[in-house]
């Protein structure tokens, strides 16, 4: 054997140990259940798309990994790249298959995406995104936005993260305010950026920033401040009406919030926050951000909104939609680092069948077959080592039960069953093993 | 909007419609259940590895997609590539984490892999592999090979593919035969290739090929023929003993087969076939191939074997192991094309709540909340269209039930429940809806 290849972790490409991977699978299962409970259809698109598809909207082109097939002659692949999100593939998918899909098309998609980001703590180059979207053909009723709030709440409860707040806003509200004072183009982005940046520190911080850095007209500054300070949507609505500003965004926001509550979102799980302004250049109606209470500094862990046209780069058909995305890898990493969720044991095994003497191998294998037939995860320690070694093996994997067999057990068709949690042992007849282990 | 980007499928990168994707998920779930029932731990490795890791074993380097991060200046990524199987990543994973793992390390891994193959029907460039392996540190008892046969049987039954045969061989048998006549080096590969190529046509076809094309010594040809013709392992064993050939491979094969049967593999599900010789340059003991009865022309759909050293390129520690791999994408494609498995409906939704009039929206949302609280997949058709449109929507997605609400239903707190399978409608009180729909 020649020189050995040195191996070291690849920065930005997370790889969990089995216990954390089992925890990630538990979260993926919970999210999928929440999505399916709301009638979303699963799709999966290839990791690979044509570069012209990936770059159609411009933007984060500098982060796209492109592919090259080497081999003799260094054959090119024909300009392929790895997808950096699941929205561009969805747009391509819907445009390509519009004839075969049933609209409104509710789809979920849970896949890895890749971004050539500068590596830094908590910033991943390969990570899971879990997306739901509802796409209309031609039109999509704003009431669908309440279904999206309902699916967010369902998913976070299933994740065991019951302390969450969905913050809801609507792009139309600030748009109407801006258009009332004739603000257009880049000034709109500047204004929204300042509202978003300072919004969490309250209305006064926002108005100060708009006045100073933003150089915004005084009546706009004042109305923004009063709007962010409004105690509820009725107050916000009167305020806008009094100033001659179109208040339809407020009406829509109220309807969506009400419908979300009727769909089972709890009062404390949802909250209108007109200061949410990130991504408002892309979204056209409802906007969602989701925060874990007490962990607001993590930022939103599930964001999205309503858009007018999903796939204008690929098709003439207008495809309005609404959806949200969870960046699961970062969320898992934060939850595990901060010990905010239970981490699974490394192994799914419920019972380890220990082997001390090959004489009883046949009986040991029968025990394993019996347990597995009943759906109980079982493994056989196939090498006759010291019992202590086999117990440490089970213990380090978090296996709760060990089935021990010697001459008398094999003769009587019984098992000495050891509970590794309590350290207690008891004799169990083979025909009682399944109920004993499954707690029935 | 400028010119639209033309989109067309990427050859070799499969993308299923939602019904087939749901079928794929059902299969992935079944495989995972079978793996976990046998106490395998899940791991997931990044899609991306260092090129020097991927190419350590040489071989299919010409198929590896390498990555390039473009951006200004065309920054290189530092020689990264997409994994082309899950064995090389497993070797790297185990070598890197040997200190933290508990051995024997039973791991399963179900991920996409990428190969820059020439595109042709049934040959994919991106596809799922589902692997199980048991890795020992220093040594691994041959009896573990029976656990692998058991997991194969469990998985194929769970996939609903009960008509399968696991064909078992052991590299040591033909090795001993070859070494008895002093065959070495390239001649070994030539011999194994001929046995594998003609094995399915019987012993006579093999001996003819070995004699002609293979130019093998007559006693070797004769013994090979008699061995492949042997009616059972006892006969094979006597034959080898008579010729002074080491028969330990036969003993091991018999022990593994017996143990597999004790573990619950059915007699008709497993069969010794000494003509299985593919991959014998890599494997050192037991070899597995799995065929679907009546579809032998598909070749093996789950293959693998025993190896002496998983990760010699990365570590000094000897890591013997045994495992198998299922190429799920090809299997799914063949099963669906040949209509050999039931394809799921496109949608998981059990009940569509139809909306005909916004007046009753509040009640409709309450119905949805009630169903979802009981775990019943439900969606609300949030736009008040003609009932006929809503029924066709449900029908095209395979949704079995539609909940219809009008003035009288809203007043009485009942639902007109339509079964789309039978076309029958009935009035159901709201508090009876969950048991009615879930069939309790």
Image (cartoon, coloured by chain):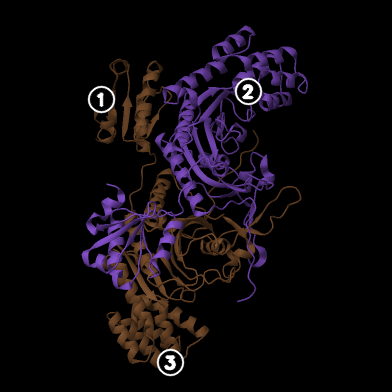
Chain colours: A purple, B brown
Give the percent coordinates (x, y) of residue B245: 38, 89
Q: Nearer the viewer, mark 2 or mark 1?
A: 2
The residue tagged 1 is: B428
As helix, strand or loop, the secondary structure at mark 2 comes to loop
Whether residue A125 is situated above or below residue A201 in the rendered picture: below
Mark 1 closeness class: few <14, some 14–19, many ≥20 residues within 10 Å: some
The first of marks 3 and 1 along the sequence is: 3
Q: Name the mark on residue B157.
A: none
The residue tagged 2 is: A275
The chain ID associated with circle 1 is: B
Q: Nearer the viewer, mark 3 or mark 1?
A: 1
Q: Are marks 2 and 3 on the same chain?
A: no
Can see residue A272? Answer: yes
Is A180 or A226 nearer to us in this picture? A226
Q: Are marks 3 and 1 on the same chain?
A: yes
Q: Name the mark on residue B217.
A: 3
Mark 2 closeness class: few <14, some 14–19, many ≥20 residues within 10 Å: many
Q: Is residue A298 left or right of residue B185?
A: right
Is A339 or B263 nearer to us in this picture? A339
Is A315 or A35 nearer to us in this picture? A35
Give the percent coordinates (x, y) of residue A340: 52, 40
Rounded to the nearest angstrom, the CA distance separating label 2 from label 3 is 86 Å
Give the percent coordinates (x, y) of residue A388: 41, 64
């Amino acid at each position: 054997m020649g020189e050995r290849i040195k191996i070291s972790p690849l920065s930005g490409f997370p790889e969990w140990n089995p216990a954390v991977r089992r925890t990630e699978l538990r979260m993926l299962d919970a999210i999928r259940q929440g999505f399916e409970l709301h009638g979303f259809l699963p799709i999966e698109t290839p990791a690979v798309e044509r570069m012209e598809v990936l770059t159609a909207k411009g933007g984060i082109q500098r982060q796209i990994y492109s592919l090259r097939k080497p081999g003799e002659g260094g054959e090119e692949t024909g300009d392929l790249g790895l997808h950096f999100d699941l929205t561009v593939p969805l747009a391509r998918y819907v445009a390509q298959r519009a004839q075969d899909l049933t609209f409104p098309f509710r789809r979920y998609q849970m896949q890895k995406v890749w971004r050539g980001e500068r590596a830094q703590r908590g910033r991943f180059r390969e990570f899971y995104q879990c997306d739901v979207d509802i796409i209309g053909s031609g039109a999509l009723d704003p009431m669908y936005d309440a279904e999206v709030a309902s699916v967010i709440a369902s998913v976070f409860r299933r994740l065991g993260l019951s302390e969450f707040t969905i913050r809801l806003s609507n792009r139309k509200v600030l748009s109407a305010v801006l258009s009332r004072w004739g603000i257009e183009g880049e000034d709109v982005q500047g204004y929204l950026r300042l509202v978003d940046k300072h919004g969490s520190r309250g209305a006064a911080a926002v108005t100060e920033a708009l006045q100073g850095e933003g150089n915004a007209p005084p009546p706009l500054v004042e109305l923004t401040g009063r709007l962010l300070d409004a105690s509820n949507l009725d107050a916000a609505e009167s305020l806008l009406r009094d100033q001659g500003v179109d208040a339809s965004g407020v009406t829509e926001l109220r309807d969506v919030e009400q419908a979300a509550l009727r769909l089972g979102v709890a009062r404390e799980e949802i909250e209108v926050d007109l200061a949410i302004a990130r991504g408002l250049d892309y979204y056209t109606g409802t906007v969602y951000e989701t925060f874990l209470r007490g962990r607001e500094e993590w930022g939103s862990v599930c964001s999205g909104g309503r858009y007018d046209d999903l796939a204008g780069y690929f098709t003439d058909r207008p495809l309005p939609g609404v959806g949200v995305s969870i960046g699961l890898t970062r969320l898992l990493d934060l939850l595990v680092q901060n010990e905010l969720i239970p981490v699974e044991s490394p192994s799914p095994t419920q019972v380890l069948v220990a082997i001390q003497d090959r004489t009883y191998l046949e009986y040991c294998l029968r025990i394993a077959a019996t347990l597995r037939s009943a759906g109980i995860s079982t493994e056989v320690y196939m090498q006759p080592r010291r019992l202590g070694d086999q117990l440490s093996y089970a213990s380090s994997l978090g296996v709760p039960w060990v089935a021990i067999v010697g001459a008398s057990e094999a003769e009587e068709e019984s098992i000495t069953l050891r509970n590794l949690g309590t350290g207690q042992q008891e004799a169990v007849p083979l025909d009682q093993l399944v109920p004993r282990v499954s707690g029935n």
